[in-house]
């Protein structure tokens, strides 16, 4: 079980990327990343969260020759400007050297590290980790510390909220990393226990699986299975253990699915009450699926909500079966 306050350096990173203008062309070349990284900006904070160093580089595009209109509007950057950049592999190697040792990546939102690893793989580089990569999602931490924990706001809104001085313009990789670093440094450290995982590389073995207990819920990322059926037959995947006392619990609502992707159940612990289980089945790159399971203690009222969801799923299922068999029901 990994759980401790993080005491290491923080590499706060932001990427700018371009996307293929021609979607069909993109889909034809399967291995080509949808987003080509064209700029890396980062700040490194020491374990006392003081800024130690800055990193800012442009990358010379090699996949997409035109700047997508979205990037153009956001970046105020021209393709000519990017021509002065260095190739991705070179910049990335410099960047990793600059990161140093014993640090955790921090990003605003959950996307950057997957895009970064997708570009690394495209260029034949070793990815950041061959298993899920722990990182701090500053946008999420900000919401946990100052909002409801669920909603997400823009970086600029967070900067305004914390009355951080806006001394450089937004929307370039470096400036966004710079501000995200300032926001991170202001968030009380106890919130850092709510770290996230980038699952660009899902666990391939049992040893690589993630099982963490957070404040108020527990999360597991199970290894890749050949298909959904195999995943759902795994005892560990479908087990309901109380994450507080570790006891195996009886289910009061068995696993059901409203859509074939997410599965829900409810179990009951004599000591800790009702616990909701949720499975999300995700496609792994290439082949197979992996499973993300979350369990959470809930109120009897929330149990009723899940029961209604189950009834609704049953009804849809019956309707579907009826229409498939030509309208005859057998109730
Ligand atoms: Zn319990």
Image (spheres, rainbow, N blue to C red):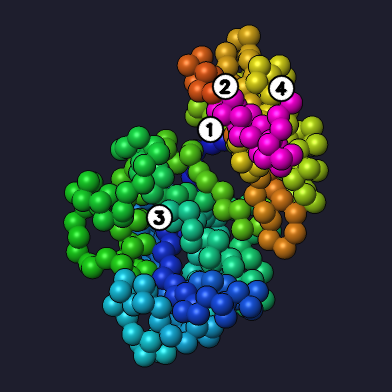
Question: Alpha-carbon neighbours of circle 4 within 10 Å: few (<14), some, or many (≥20)?
Answer: few
Question: Alpha-carbon neighbours of circle 1 within 10 Å: few (<14), some, or many (≥20)?
Answer: some
Q: Position of residue 124 (x, y in %)?
A: 67, 76
Which numbered disc flags the more N-terminal residue, 4 or 1?
1
Which numbered disc flags the more N-terminal residue, 3 or 4?
3
Boundaries of the magenta span: 309-331
Q: Which mark is residue 307?
A: 2
Q: Is residue 103 visible?
A: yes
* Farthest-out residue, top: 270
Cα distance, mark 1 to mark 2?
Answer: 26 Å
Q: Is residue 117 left or right of residue 164?
A: right
Q: Is residue 193 left or right of residue 232?
A: left
Q: Which residue in the structure is indicated by mark 4?
A: 331
Which numbered disc flags the more N-terminal residue, 3 or 1?
3
Q: Nearer the viewer, residue 154 or 304?
A: 304
Contact check, label 4 and label 1, Cβ < 8 Å: no
Q: Which residue in the structure is indicated by mark 3?
A: 108
Query: What secondary structure prevails in the magenta region?
Result: helix
Q: For marks 3 and 4, give the one nearer the viewer.
A: 4
Residue 105, placed above or below residue 273? below
Q: For marks 1 and 2, give the one nearer the viewer.
A: 2
Element carrying mark 2: helix
Which numbered disc flags the more N-terminal residue, 2 or 4?
2
- Quadrant for the C terminus in the image: top right
Q: Which residue in the structure is indicated by mark 1?
A: 214
Q: Residue at (33%, 63%) from the top-left corner?
A: 176
């Amino acid at each position: 079980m990994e759980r401790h306050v993080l005491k290491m350096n923080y590499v706060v990173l932001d990427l700018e990327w371009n996307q293929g203008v021609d979607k069909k062309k993109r889909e034809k070349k399967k291995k080509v990343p949808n987003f080509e990284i064209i700029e890396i900006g980062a700040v490194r904070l020491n374990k006392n969260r003081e800024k130690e160093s800055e990193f800012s580089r442009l990358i010379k595009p090699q996949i997409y020759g035109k700047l997508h209109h979205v990037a153009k509007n956001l970046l105020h950057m021209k393709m000519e400007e990017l021509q002065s950049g260095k190739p991705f592999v070179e910049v990335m190697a410099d960047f990793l050297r600059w990161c140093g040792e014993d640090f955790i990546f921090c990003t605003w939102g959950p996307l950057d590290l997957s895009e970064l690893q997708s570009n690394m793989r495209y260029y034949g580089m070793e990815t950041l980790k061959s298993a899920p990569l722990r990182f701090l999602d500053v946008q999420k931490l900000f919401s946990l510390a100052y909002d409801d924990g669920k909603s997400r706001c823009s970086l600029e809104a967070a900067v305004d909220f914390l009355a951080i001085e806006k001394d450089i313009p937004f929307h370039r990789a470096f400036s966004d990393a710079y501000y995200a670093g300032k926001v991170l440094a202001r968030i009380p450290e106890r919130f850092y226990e709510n770290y996230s995982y980038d699952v660009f590389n899902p666990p391939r073995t049992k040893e690589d699986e993630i099982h963490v207990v957070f404040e108020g819920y527990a999360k597991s990322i199970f290894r890749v299975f050949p298909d959904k059926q195999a995943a759902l037959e795994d005892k560990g995947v479908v087990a309901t253990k109380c994450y507080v006392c570790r006891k195996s619990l009886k289910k009061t609502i068995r696993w059901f699915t409203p859509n074939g992707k997410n599965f829900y159940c409810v179990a009951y612990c004599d000591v800790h009450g009702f616990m909701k289980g949720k499975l999300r089945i995700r496609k792994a790159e290439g082949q197979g699926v992996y499973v993300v399971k979350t369990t959470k203690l809930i109120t009897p009222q929330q149990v009723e909500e899940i029961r209604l969801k189950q009834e609704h799923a049953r009804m849809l299922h019956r309707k579907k079966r009826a229409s498939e068999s030509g309208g005859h029901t057998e109730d």
